Structure formats: structure tokens, C-alpha cells
Image (cartoon, rainbow, N blue to C red):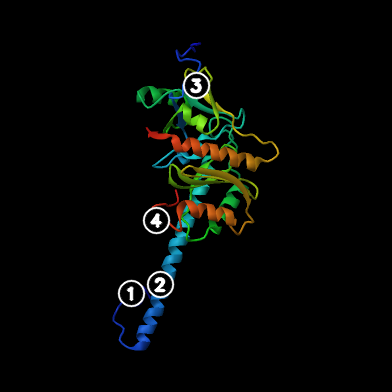
């Protein structure tokens, strides 16, 4: 279908229509593949991070391991992110939470922690503006305030930002 | 002014350089040390740092390797002591080991762990925004 969709030799109206339909399907498949691929990579990195931090004291002090519940909630959050937003970078935190960071620059960032319950702690810097809050994640939908916060930092999509 | 065993004064000046050593690969990217790198430990609610700047690098890494112990040392986040005040936190010497200091004053709210974390993250982000990343 790829060859057919991308070929440009259709002559009749029906053939052109069929070619356009094939192009649309291929484009959709490509897009889904790209999005699925990016989220899959982010989830693989999440699992790798949890493996790195699976022992108590992974920070050389007394950090708590990243537990399977935290991994599951973080994965659900990553899957729930709308496709128009770039995926975050991931980092471990001493309390066993996973930090999801959207970093536009040193003074413009949004950092959200996912722990072992549905409450998400987050903070942002936007030039001289800064703040913090807590929101509840139902497992399926990213809280609107969180979405707005991320969007205000990264815009509707920044090709220079990619999952870590 | 009192002089500590390291030879440094007991009062940390606003312009003094401080280093937070990076022992987790997820705690920095190509641009900066992330807020997570500055969060306090759970035991004493402090962030360990060293009173050292970028120069000389050999001295910085010698301190870092000592602090890292068995962990890999990836680099350091260097920032001025006044950056700690900007985040509305405190920094005080804590020797031994030589040149060791701690950032104190992190919000601690026993009945709301997530709000406590949100407040800490904001302060950690302020620290991160002022730090220069030096990789080994």
C-alpha cells in the first residue's frame, strides 16, 4: 500500500480517489507508529529508571525505591498525555516518586511528581513567575490545570523537546 | 570569625560557590541539573553540598568522588550561595567532611505529603535554574 499511496501514476478519477484514500491510511499509520513509538520509548525509559532505583538508598543516603504502583501510575499518565504535547524527561526522586520534567530552558520548566497515589505534586518556573500545586489524576485524564501548565511552558508542541 | 577544620570561614558568603554533585544520570540533561537533583534527603531533610566552585576542577572532582563513594560521579551543579536565599532556603557549613555544607529549611508538612513535595519542587526548581552544569 505504501508504494501505491506514494506513487503518482493514477490516471482515472477512481484511481486517484483510491490513491488518496491509501495515502490517508498510510499517513495515519505512520503517525500512530511515531506516537506509539515515542510513548513506548518513554515507558521503556521509565522501567529502566525503576530498575536503577529498585533498592533502598539508591541515592547513597536513604532514598525509597520506585515501586511498581508508581511505575503503573506514571505509565498511565504518559499514555494519557495528549499527542500534541512533547513527552517529558524522567528523573528519580528521593521519596520514590518519578519526576516528569518539561524543560524549555533553565528558567522555563514544568516539573511534576508521580508517586504511589493519585495526587500529583507539581511546580513551574516561567521567567520570574513561579508556583506549585497539587492535582488529582484519575488514571485516564490528565488534570486540566496540569495540561494548561505544561502547555504554557512548552506551547502546543516543540520539536526540540523529546522524551529523555 | 571562626575558622573550620577545612580552613574555610564558618559563615558562607553570598558570593561563595557551592557544588551539588550529580550521581544519578536522570538528574541532568544536556542543559542543566534538574530540580530532582536538589531535593532534600528523607532522613534529615537536608541537601548535601560542598563549598567548592568550578576551579580547580581537580579539587572539585576529588571532593565529588569522596562524596559519591561507590556511586558513579557524573558531574556537578555549581551555584552561588545567594541562590539558596533566592529559593528562601538556608545554607550552613556541616564539617566533617571538609568543605561539606547543607541546604536546610525545606518545607515539611507532615499531614500533606504532596503539598509538601510541590513546595519543595518549586524551591528545587529555583536552585536548578541558577546552577551551572559541569560534567566530568
Q: Residue at x 65, y 48 (%)?
A: A117
Q: What is the chain identity of the residue bearing mark 2?
A: A
> Which disc is residue B90 wearing?
none
Q: Secondary structure at mark 1?
A: helix
Residue at far front of view: A128
- From the viewer's perspective, is the residue at label 3 or at label 1 nearer? 3
State the residue lying farthest toward the right. Answer: B111
Give a yes or no on whether discs 3 and 2 share a subunit.
Answer: no
Badge 4 and badge 1 both on one subunit: yes
Q: Is residue A10 left or right of residue B131?
A: left
Q: Nearer the viewer, mark 3 or mark 2?
A: 3
Do we see residue B24 in this rendering? Answer: no
Q: Position of residue A163 (x, y in %)?
A: 45, 51
**Disc marking residue B100:** 3
The numbered mark, 1 or 2, whose residue comes first in the sequence reads 1
- Which of these two is toward me, B72 or B55? B55
**Residue at image x 41%, y 67%?**
A30
Residue B114 is left or right of residue B69, and the answer is: right
Q: Which residue is mark 2?
A: A26
The Cα atoms of the two marked residues, 1 and 2, are separated by: 9 Å
Q: Is disc 3 in contact with disc 2, using a CB cutoff of under 8 Å?
A: no
In this view of the protein, which residue sits in the foreground, A34 or B55?
B55
Residue at mark 3 to residue at mark 2: CA–CA distance: 59 Å
Front position in the image: A151 or A127: A127
Tell me the tag on residue A6.
1
Question: Crowding at label 1, few (<14), some or many (≥20) Cα neighbours within 10 Å?
Answer: few
The quadrant the C terminus of chain B occupies is top left
**Which is in the foreground here, disc 2 or disc 4?**
4
Q: Is residue B48 above or below residue A66?
A: above
| Contact? badges 1 and 2 (CB < 8 Å) | yes
The answer to which image quadrant residue A25 occupies is: bottom left
Q: Is residue A23 left or right of residue B116?
A: left
Amino acid at each position: 500500500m505504501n508504494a501505491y499511496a506514494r506513487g503518482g501514476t493514477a490516471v482515472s478519477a477512481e484511481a486517484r480517489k483510491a490513491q488518496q484514500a491509501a495515502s490517508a491510511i498510510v499517513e495515519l499509520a505512520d503517525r500512530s507508529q511515531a506516537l506509539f513509538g515515542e510513548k513506548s520509548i518513554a515507558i521503556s525509559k521509565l522501567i529502566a529508571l525503576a530498575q536503577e532505583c529498585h533498592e533502598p538508598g539508591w541515592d547513597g543516603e536513604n532514598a525509597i525505591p520506585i515501586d511498581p504502583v508508581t511505575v503503573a501510575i506514571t505509565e498511565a499518565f504518559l499514555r494519557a498525555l495528549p499527542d500534541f504535547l512533547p513527552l517529558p524527561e524522567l528523573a528519580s526522586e528521593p521519596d520514590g516518586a518519578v519526576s516528569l520534567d518539561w524543560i524549555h530552558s533553565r528558567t522555563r520548566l514544568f516539573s511534576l511528581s508521580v508517586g504511589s497515589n493519585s495526587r500529583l505534586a507539581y511546580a513551574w518556573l516561567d521567567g520570574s513567575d513561579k508556583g506549585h500545586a497539587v492535582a488529582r489524576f484519575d488514571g485516564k485524564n490528565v488534570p486540566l490545570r496540569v495540561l494548561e501548565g505544561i502547555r504554557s511552558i512548552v506551547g502546543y508542541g516543540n520539536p526540540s523537546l523529546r522524551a529523555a | 570569625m571562626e575558622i573550620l577544620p577545612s580552613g574555610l570561614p564558618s559563615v558562607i558568603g553570598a558570593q561563595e560557590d557551592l557544588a551539588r554533585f550529580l550521581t544519578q544520570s536522570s538528574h541532568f540533561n544536556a542543559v542543566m541539573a534538574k530540580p530532582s537533583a536538589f531535593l532534600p534527603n528523607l532522613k534529615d531533610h537536608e541537601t548535601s553540598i560542598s563549598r567548592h566552585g568550578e576551579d580547580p576542577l581537580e579539587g572539585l572532582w576529588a571532593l565529588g568522588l569522596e562524596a559519591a563513594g561507590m556511586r558513579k560521579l557524573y558531574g556537578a551543579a555549581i551555584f552561588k550561595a545567594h541562590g539558596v536565599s533566592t529559593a528562601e532556603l538556608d545554607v550552613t557549613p556541616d564539617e566533617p567532611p571538609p568543605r561539606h555544607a547543607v541546604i536546610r529549611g525545606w518545607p515539611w508538612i507532615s499531614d500533606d505529603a504532596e503539598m509538601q513535595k510541590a513546595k519543595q519542587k518549586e524551591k528545587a526548581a529555583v536552585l536548578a535554574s541558577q546552577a551551572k552544569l559541569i560534567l566530568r
